[in-house]
Image: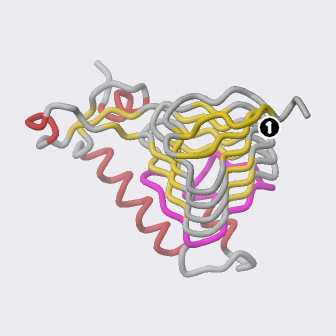
Amino acid sequence: MATEKEKMRSGQLANVSDPELFADLLRAKSLISKMNTMYLGSPDLQDVQKELLPNIHPTAKICPPFFCDYGYNIELGEHAFINFNCVILDGAPVKIGHHTLIGPAVQIYTPQHPINYLERRETVETAHAVTIGNDCWIGGGAVICPGVTIGDRCIVGAGSVVTKDVPDDSLVVGNPAVIKRRLDKW
């Protein structure tokens, strides 16, 4: 039988008050608190980030303050950059590709609460993976919703809300975000 952690990471309904998940959440919050007292050039920042986010490439950079749920579900590629005040709710895997730039105050969500209000009263939710490709630029204040895949070389305009997958080489803007232009066709 799958653990609550395995259920959460695979998109199944999971009890997020499970003792293992709650301990993981508290561990992450402690590390986040420590990390958010540092600045980008702090000598210990990379060590704290590596402990919180074991799946980030050594060349990836994250500017504090930064917020997440667990940390271990976040993967950052080579030279990926996350600007300050970003939130990544990582119940499911969040994969951010090489050379991708994440603007300030971007929010990436994987959790999905039940539609039924009675189920919502319980401590259960599903989580759906988010993938952002290589060489993307996510503008400040954008929101990436659960289960979205953004292809390679895409631009998401500032303040956009991405609710659906975005194909490679696309510029998307708005709420909900829509394709405004193909970037491979000038």
Name of the residue lying farthest toward the right: 186
User: Relative to residue 28, is residue 1 depicted above or below?
Assistant: above
Tell which of 125 and 46 is nearer to you: 125
Residue 56 as seen in the image, left or right of residue 27: right
Crowding near the residue tagged with mark 1, few <14, some 14–19, many ≥20 C-alpha atoms within 10 Å:
many
Tell which of 139 and 174 is nearer to you: 174
Tell which of 148 and 81 is nearer to you: 148
Determine which quarter of the picture holds residue 172. Answer: top right
Tell me, yes or no, whether the highlighted magenta stretch contains residue 108.
no
Looking at the rendered structure, the secondary structure element under dot 1 is loop
Residue at 60 percent across and 72 percent down: it is 64
Residue at 42 percent across and 68 percent down: it is 30
Where residue 79 appears, x then y in whole percent?
A: 81, 52
Name of the residue lying farthest toward the top: 1
Residue 147 as seen in the image, left or right of residue 136: left
Residue at 50 percent across and 58 percent down: it is 87
Where residue 53 appears, x then y in whole percent?
A: 59, 53
The amino acid type found where label 1 is placed reads Arg
User: Relative to residue 50, is residue 120 depicted above or below?
Assistant: above
Determine which quarter of the picture holds residue 27. Answer: bottom left
User: Relative to residue 3, is residue 70 depicted above or below?
Assistant: below
Residue at 75 percent across and 55 percent down: it is 60
Where residue 142 appears, x then y in whole percent?
A: 56, 53
Which residue in the structure is indicated by mark 1?
153
Tell which of 43 and 103 is nearer to you: 103
Look at the image and tell me in which quarter the C terminus lies: top right
Tell me, yes or no, whether the highlighted magenta stretch contains residue 57.
yes
Q: What is the total number of numbered labels drawn onto the structure image?
A: 1
Question: Which residue range is magenta in the image?
Answer: 50-70
